[in-house]
C-alpha cells in the first residue's frame, strides 16, 4: 500500500471509530449526558461528546495495530502449517477457545442475575453476528470462499484481544465500558478487513500510473536530446 492510500485508510478508520463510539455513548451512557442537557449546559454536553469521539479514535488506533499484527500472524501461520487448510483448522480451534474464555472467564464471574446474562449475551451476539456478517460480505466482495475462516478469526479472536486490553485497569462502571468499547472495535475492524483490498488495488493503480509517467518523461527526454 502506498503512503497516500495508507493515510486515507488510517484516517477513515479513525473517523469511523470516533463517530461510532460517540453514537454508542449517546445510547449506552445517556444518563451521563442527560443532566447536561437538562441544565442547559450545552458546552459540557459537547465536551462529553468530543471526549467519547477521542476515546473511539483511541480504540481505532488499537484496532489498526491489531489488524497489522494479524496480517503478520496470518502469513506466519500459513508458512508454519504449510497449507491454508491446516491453518484454517487451527484458526477454528482458536475461535472456539476464545469464545469459551469470554463466556466462562470474562462474563460468568460478573453475571449475578438473569439480567447480567442477557446483557453479556447481547454483547456476544454483537461480536459473533458482526463477525459473521463481515465474513460473508468479504466472500461476496472477493468471490473467495476460503476467506470465511480467516475473517471470522480476525473479527472474533483479534477483536476480543483488543477488547480485553482496552478494558484492563478500568474498575469504575466496568459494565458500561464493556458495552461501549466493543462497538468502535467491531466497526473499525470490519472496515479494515473489507476495505484493505480496495486500497491495495488503488495503490497498484497509482504505481502503474507513476511508472507510466516516468516512462513518458524518459521518452520525452530522449526526444529532446535527439
Image (cartoon, rainbow, N blue to C red):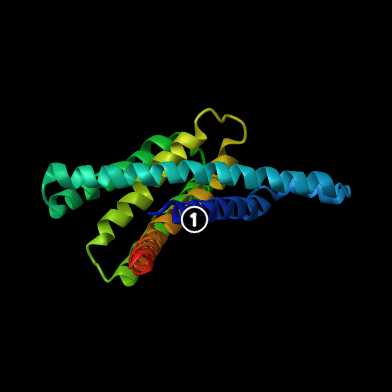
> Farthest residue toward the front?
226
Q: Is residue 169 above or below residue 197?
A: above
Near-viewer residue (5 or 135): 5
Left or right of 177, for residue 38? right
Q: Residue at x 55, y 55 (%)?
A: 16
Task: Determine if residue 133 is in view.
Answer: no
Identify the residue shown where x is 78% and y is 47%. Answer: 45
Residue 58: x percent and y percent? 55, 41
Please say if 154 is above or below 161: below
Name the residue nearer the viewer: 144 or 186. Answer: 144
Question: Along the horizontal axis of the image, is 208 left or right of 183?
Answer: left
**In the current view of this chain or complex, which residue is farthest to the right?**
40
Q: Position of residue 167 (x, y in %)?
A: 51, 35
Q: Is residue 110 left or right of residue 157?
A: right
Residue 123 position in % (x across, y down): 48, 50
> Is residue 15 at all visible to an observer of this figure?
yes
- Image quarter of the C terminus: bottom left
State the residue in front, 150 or 36. Answer: 150
Residue 47 placement: quadrant: top right
Neighbour class for label 1 at 10 Å: few (<14), some, many (≥20)? many
Seen as rendered, the residue at the extreme left is 82
Name which residue lies at 53% across and 27% down: 169
Quadrant showing the N terminus = bottom left
- Locate residue 149, reporting x and y percent: 26, 56
- In the picture of the structure, the residue carrying the numbered disc 1 is 187
Label 1 residue SS: helix
The quarter of the displayed image where residue 221 is located: bottom left
Amino acid at each position: 500500500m502506498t503512503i497516500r492510500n495508507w493515510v486515507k485508510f488510517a484516517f477513515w478508520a479513525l473517523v469511523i471509530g470516533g463517530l461510532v463510539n460517540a453514537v454508542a455513548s449517546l445510547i449506552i451512557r445517556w444518563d451521563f449526558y442527560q443532566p447536561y442537557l437538562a441544565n442547559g449546559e450545552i458546552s459540557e454536553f459537547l465536551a462529553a461528546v468530543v471526549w467519547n469521539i477521542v476515546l473511539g479514535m483511541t480504540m481505532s488506533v488499537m484496532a489498526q495495530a491489531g489488524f497489522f499484527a494479524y496480517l503478520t500472524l496470518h502469513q506466519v501461520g500459513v508458512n508454519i502449517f504449510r497449507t491454508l487448510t491446516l491453518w484454517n483448522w487451527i484458526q477454528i480451534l482458536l475461535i472456539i477457545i476464545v469464545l469459551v474464555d469470554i463466556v466462562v472467564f470474562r462474563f460468568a464471574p460478573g453475571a449475578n442475575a438473569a439480567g447480567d446474562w442477557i446483557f453479556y449475551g447481547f454483547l456476544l451476539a454483537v461480536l459473533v453476528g458482526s463477525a459473521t456478517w463481515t465474513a460473508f460480505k468479504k466472500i461476496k466482495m472477493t468471490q473467495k470462499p476460503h476467506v470465511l475462516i480467516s475473517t471470522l478469526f480476525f473479527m472474533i479472536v483479534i477483536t476480543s484481544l483488543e477488547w480485553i486490553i482496552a478494558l484492563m485497569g478500568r474498575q469504575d462502571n466496568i459494565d458500561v465500558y464493556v458495552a461501549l468499547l466493543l462497538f468502535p472495535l467491531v466497526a473499525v475492524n470490519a472496515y479494515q478487513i473489507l476495505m484493505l483490498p480496495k486500497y491495495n488495488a488503488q495503490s497498484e493503480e497509482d504505481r502503474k500510473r507513476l511508472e507510466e509517467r516516468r516512462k513518458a518523461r524518459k521518452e520525452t527526454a530522449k526526444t529532446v536530446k535527439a
